[in-house]
Image (cartoon, coloured by chain):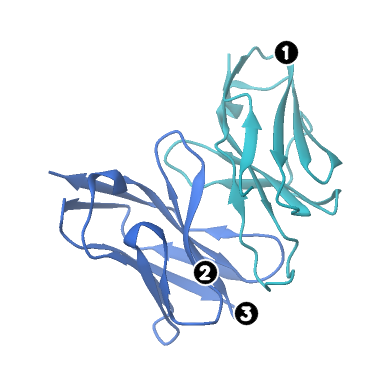
C-alpha cells in the first residue's frame, strides 16, 4: 500500500523568494516519486522524478526535490519564485503496477 | 513527439446524448489511462489499458465505456451521463510497468472539459 500527504493545501510567496512545497510518502515498495504541476484548465506536466538514482533531483523551470528516506519526504523547492509558477502542484508516488497515488495538491500563489 | 492530444477541448452534452472523447499519443507507449478530475481535486483513475487490453476498471459506472482501437488511440464513449459527471477528463500514457525504466512516468494530455446539462 502507498500514500502521499501534501502538508500544505495553499502556499503563498512573494515573487523572487524561495518556494517550499512539502510532501511525505508511505510505500511498501521502493517508491518512484514525482512532482506534477497543473496550470488552470490545463493537463498535468511532469516537473521532476525520483527513481532510486540520485537523491537530489533537478527538474524543469528551476525546481528541485530531495528524496529523504529517513524522513519519508520528497519536498519540492525553488530558489526564486516567478509569477508563472502560480499553479496547483501534485506529489505522486508509484510503488508498483500501473497505478499512481496522488497527493491532494498544493495551490501555489505568487504575489508581486 | 512527447505529446498526448485530446479532442474535443470542451464538450457540453445533455443527459440523453451519446458522445465520445478521443486521445492520441505517438510515443510508442503501450499503457493508456483515463482520469476524471473535479475542481480543486487530484485526478481519479478510471481505466487503464495495457497492450490494448483493459487491465484496470476502477468500478466506473457503465455509462462510461472505454475503447482502445490500437496502441496510439484511446476513446471514452459517454451515454446517459449525469450532471455530477461534469469534470475535466484527462488521458495519459506511459510504458507499461515496470517497463525498461522500472517506473511509471505518465504523460498527460490537456484534458476535455465536460459539462453535462
Query: How far from the left and from the top, in percent, is residue B66?
Result: 79, 36
Q: Would you name the residue on which mark 2 appears?
A: A33
Q: Are marks 1 and 2 on the same chain?
A: no
| Mark 3 Cα shell of 10 Å, populated few (<14), some (14-19), many (≥20) | few
| Mark 1 Cα shell of 10 Å, populated few (<14), some (14-19), many (≥20) | few
Chain painted in blue in the figure: A
Q: Are marks 2 and 3 on the same chain?
A: yes
Q: Would you name the residue on which mark 1 appears?
A: B17
> What chain does badge 1 belong to?
B
Locate residue B87 relative to residue B39 in the image: left or right.
Answer: right
Separation of residues labelled 1 and 3 (CA atoms): 44 Å
In depth, the one of B62 and B46 nearer the eye is B46
Check if mark 2's residue and mark 3's residue have beta carbons within 8 Å. Answer: no
Q: Would you name the residue on which mark 3 appears?
A: A29
In depth, the one of B94 and B38 nearer the eye is B94
Q: Quadrant of residue A57?
A: bottom left
Residue B42, compared with residue A2, is above or below; it is above
Query: How far from the left and from the top, in percent, is residue A24?
Result: 41, 71
In depth, the one of A60 and A75 nearer the eye is A60
Locate residue B8 relative to residue A9 in the image: left or right.
Answer: right
Locate residue B36 relative to residue B58 in the image: left or right.
Answer: left
Q: Secondary structure at mark 2?
A: strand
Check if mark 1's residue and mark 2's residue have beta carbons within 8 Å. Answer: no
Q: Which residue is depicted at the point 60% across and 51% down?
A: B107
> What chain does badge 2 belong to?
A
Chain painted in cyan in the figure: B
Q: Which residue is depicted at the point 74% across and 69% down?
A: B99
Q: Which residue is depicted at the point 55% across and 81% down?
A: A52
Q: Secondary structure at mark 3?
A: loop
Amino acid at each position: 500500500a502507498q500514500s502521499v500527504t501534501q502538508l500544505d493545501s495553499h502556499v503563498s510567496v512573494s515573487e523572487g523568494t524561495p518556494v517550499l512545497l512539502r510532501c511525505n510518502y508511505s510505500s511498501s515498495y521502493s517508491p518512484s516519486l514525482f512532482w506534477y504541476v497543473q496550470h488552470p484548465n490545463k493537463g498535468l506536466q511532469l516537473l521532476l522524478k525520483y527513481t532510486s538514482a540520485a537523491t537530489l533531483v533537478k527538474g524543469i523551470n528551476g525546481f528541485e526535490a530531495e528524496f529523504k528516506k529517513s524522513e519519508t519526504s520528497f519536498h519540492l523547492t525553488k530558489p526564486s519564485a516567478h509569477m508563472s509558477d502560480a499553479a496547483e502542484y501534485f506529489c505522486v508516488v508509484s510503488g508498483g503496477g500501473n497505478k499512481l497515488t496522488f497527493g491532494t495538491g498544493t495551490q501555489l500563489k505568487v504575489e508581486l | 513527439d512527447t505529446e498526448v492530444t485530446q479532442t474535443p477541448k470542451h464538450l457540453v452534452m445533455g443527459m440523453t446524448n451519446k458522445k465520445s472523447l478521443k486521445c492520441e499519443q505517438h510515443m510508442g507507449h503501450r499503457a493508456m489511462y483515463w482520469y476524471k478530475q473535479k475542481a480543486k481535486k487530484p485526478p481519479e483513475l478510471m481505466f487503464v489499458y495495457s497492450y490494448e487490453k483493459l487491465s484496470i476498471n476502477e468500478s466506473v459506472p457503465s455509462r462510461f465505456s472505454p475503447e482502445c482501437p490500437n496502441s496510439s488511440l484511446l476513446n471514452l464513449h459517454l451515454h446517459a451521463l449525469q450532471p455530477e459527471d461534469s469534470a475535466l477528463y484527462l488521458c495519459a500514457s506511459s510504458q507499461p510497468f515496470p517497463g525498461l525504466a522500472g517506473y511509471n512516468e505518465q504523460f498527460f494530455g490537456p484534458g476535455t472539459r465536460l459539462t453535462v446539462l
